């Protein structure tokens, strides 16, 4: 595409250099269009390099943003784990204080049997 055309122009220019050096008249108009084409190729290559550097910078910025996002998600997960542990601890404390006198009851099934025995 554009690079192939530029490479072809560059190769043509490279092949013409010895012939151009042999020309004694520096105002020769035949060599001027080739110089312009070569400059266009150099500008195209420079533009491609700039675009590639810009894209690399954008990828780096996106990578940094993704790193911050991942860190934030890890922090949220950690906070959820801490919240769950506190909630579990509070429930265990409440359960232990509310049902202090029922430590002799091993399971609900045994509690139901004991109640049935009282009423029968």
Image (cartoon, rainbow, N blue to C red):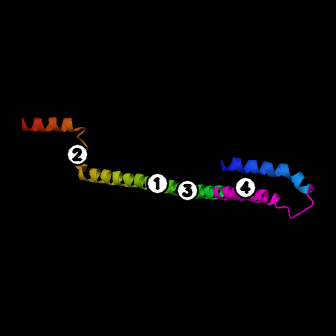
Residue tagged 1: 73
Q: Earlier in the sequence, mark 4 or mark 2?
A: 4
In the picture, residue 87 is in which quadrant?
bottom left
Instruction: Where is residue 19? Give x, y as percent.
Output: 89, 52
- The answer to whether 111 is drawn above or below residue 15 in the figure is above
Q: Is residue 47 magenta?
A: yes
- Label 4: state its secondary structure: helix
Residue tagged 4: 41
Are the residues at dot 3 and dot 2 in contact (C-beta closer than 8 Å)?
A: no
Mark nearer the viewer, 1 or 3: 3
- Label 3: state its secondary structure: helix
Q: Residue at x 65, y 47 (%)?
A: 1
Q: Earlier in the sequence, mark 3 or mark 2?
A: 3
Instruction: Where is residue 30? Give x, y as percent.
Output: 81, 58
Q: Earlier in the sequence, mark 1 or mark 2?
A: 1
- Label 1: state its secondary structure: helix
Residue 62 has which mark? Answer: 3
Dot 3 alpha-carbon crowd within 10 angstroms: few under 14, some 14 to 19, many 20 or more: few
Dot 1 alpha-carbon crowd within 10 angstroms: few under 14, some 14 to 19, many 20 or more: few
Residue 102 has which mark? Answer: 2
Q: Is residue 80 magenta?
A: no
Measure how far apart labels 4 and 2 are at the Cα level: 89 Å
Q: Which residues are magenta?
A: 22-51
- Label 2: state its secondary structure: helix
């Amino acid at each position: 595409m554009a690079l192939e055309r530029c490479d072809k122009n560059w190769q043509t220019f490279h092949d013409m250099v010895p012939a151009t050096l042999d020309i004694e008249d520096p105002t020769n108009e035949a060599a001027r269009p080739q110089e312009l084409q070569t400059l266009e190729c150099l500008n195209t290559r420079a533009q491609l390099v700039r675009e590639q550097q810009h894209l690399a910078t954008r990828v780096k910025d996106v990578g940094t943003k993704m790193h911050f996002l991942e860190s934030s998600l890890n922090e949220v997960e950690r906070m959820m784990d801490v919240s769950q542990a506190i909630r579990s601890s509070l429930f265990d404390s409440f359960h232990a204080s509310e049902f202090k006198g029922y430590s002799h009851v091993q399971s609900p099934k045994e509690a139901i049997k004991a109640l049935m025995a009282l009423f029968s």
